[in-house]
Amino acid sequence: MAKKLFLFGILILAAAGTGCGRKSVSRIDIDTQMDLSGKWNDTDSRKVSEEMISDCLSRPWLGRYLEKNGERPTVIVGSVRNQTDEHIISETFTKDLERAFINSGNVSVVASRGEREEIREERMDMQEWSSDDTVKEFMREVGADYMLTGVVNSIRDREGNKQVIFYQINLELIDTETNMKTWIGDTRIKKYIKN
């Protein structure tokens, strides 16, 4: 009898576990475009970074630099400010920009300010703990010729259960020695959302 009650209890618990509110998770290809909320997402970040860096590298500044210096320029990706009313993790976008630059093969990319601090701490640690033949020297860092900075803005228009979100992304490439702007690019995204 006790065994039957025990099995009956297990069946009831199992049935309760398969009821309402059960979450289903499935893996999808990372290149799959999915817009659930209509807000800025990974697809926007990836597409915008690839499009903007492609445009940047197709402009005359790069040819002039190569002609004058005989080697590819070094770029640092600076801050991209989020001026939208959404929480956008800007580091994801800046990493997409760095990746697009690096994968182009047309420029070198140096580490960001925060990354450099961590590397410098490691180099300091090496002075005391690494063997003489593997310790890395100070004052050997490569300076950036250009810095990429930008801003993400949005305008939201809402009426009833419908809304349109308009994003404008502006990026600028600035010569770090002269502060001259060598490229300015922008792109726009417009999303229609109906609830």
Image (cartoon, grey):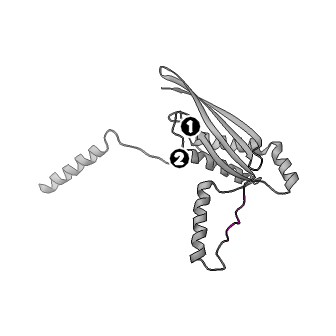
Q: Does residue 30 appear in the picture of this structure?
A: no
In the rendered image, the residue lying farthest to the front is 178
134 w.r.t. 96: above or below: below
Local packing at callout 1 (Cα closer than 10 Å; few below 14, some 14-19, many 20+) is: some
The answer to which of marks 2 and 1 sits earlier in the sequence is 2
- Element class at badge 2: loop
Callout 2 amino acid: Ile
Q: Where is residue 177 drawn, in percent x and y? A: 76, 50
Span colored in magenta: 137-143
Distance from disc 2 to disc 1, alpha carbons, whole Å, reads 19 Å
Q: Quadrant of residue 16?
A: top left
> Where residue 177 is drawn, which disc sits there?
none
> Is residue 150 found inside the magenta-colored segment of the image?
no
Determine if the magenta segment contains residue 141: yes
User: In the displayed structure, would residue 71 be above or below residue 186?
Assistant: below
Q: Residue at x 59, y 77 (%)?
A: 130
Count of all numbered marks drawn on residues in the image? 2
Amino acid marked by disc 1: Trp
The residue to which callout 1 is attached is 40
Is residue 161 rendered to the left or right of residue 171?
left
**For this rendering, which residue is in front, 41 or 139?**
139
Above or below, 53 against 166 in this view is below
Tell me the SS state at disc 1: loop
- When asked about the image quadrant of residue 189, the answer is top right
Residue at the (44%, 46%) spot, across then down: 25
Q: Are marks 2 and 1 in contact (CB under 8 Å)?
A: no
Q: Is residue 136 visible?
A: yes
